Amino acid sequence: MNSLYTLALRQCSSLSSDLQHLASLSSQNQSPSTSSPIHSRIQSTLAELQQTVDDYDHMARREIVPQIREKALARVERFRKDLDQYKQEYKRVQKSAADRSELLAASSTSSSISATSSSSPAVQQRTRYTPNSPWVPSPSAYPANSPQQQQQQSTSYGYDPRTNAALSEHDFLSTTSQTLDAYLSQGQAVLSDLASQRDVLKGTQRRLRSAANTLGLSRNTIAFVERRTREDWYILLGGGVVTLVCFYMILKYLG
């Protein structure tokens, strides 16, 4: 049962870190698709945690010691609450990512429509010019933006590299802190399990000692009864011999 408890703690820690990573990706407009490995890992971990909690609940209800059974059932309730929270958090992250992608798609569509409408008069005006006129400048006189300039313009609306690095460092530190907290909680749970096992072993030792003392008293009683049985047998034989001698003397001298 302790191995199941430790496994459930590890699965909760893995779920927490994966959900935080997915939320950070969604906040940076880098939300992965539903068929990505992180979604598959989260879904499989949720199913495994559900199975682990059910097995732990089944073993907790079969526990003989009342204190350990109550403690295990309380842990089962806490695991079920955590599992519900993880499921709600996963749904919330999925919904926020879907809403953000819809907003981005709508904004990109509106911007492309506005760009097309704004560029159409310029195209019409350019087509009115006669290319054979020496006074009309050729279209090559106004070169289009280079790909590097277009890329700079497209990325100028995002965060700068320093801000992105700071955000990444903040996410890493928060994930590390939560992982350390999960390890500390696992260590505390292991210590509490060791303390409860120590109490159980002490109770078992006391019961074994009382059983040994009971067996010792029983052996002494059995030895005493056997000794008295042998003594009674000797007394019976001696009484029989004395009785026979008395009969012989009576028959000899009084018969």
Image (cartoon, grey):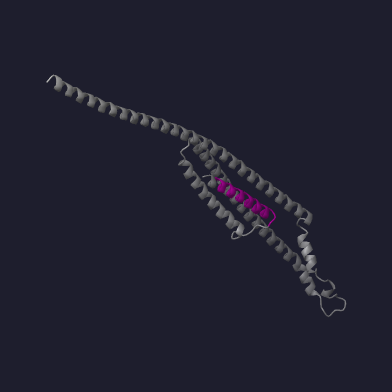
Image location of residue 206, percent across then percent down: 49, 33
Say whether residue 152 is magenta.
Answer: no
Instruction: Give the left or right position of residue 219, taking residue 198 as reference.
Output: left
| Residue drawn 66% across the image and 46% down it | 180
Vertical placement of residue 104 versus 219, above or below: below
Image location of residue 84, percent across then percent down: 55, 46
Image location of residue 89, percent across then percent down: 60, 48
Q: Is residue 53 visible?
A: yes
Q: Name the one closer to the observer, 90 or 138.
A: 90
Vertical placement of residue 118 versus 8, above or below: below
In the figure, residue 228 lies in which quadrant? top left
Q: Tell me the chief SS of the magenta region.
A: helix
Q: What residue occupies the far top of the structure in this picture?
A: 254
Q: Name the one closer to the observer, 71 or 192.
A: 192
| Residue drawn 66% across the image and 60% down it | 105
Looking at the rendering, the stretch of residues picked out in magenta corresponds to 5-29
Q: Name the one closer to the observer, 180 or 249.
A: 249
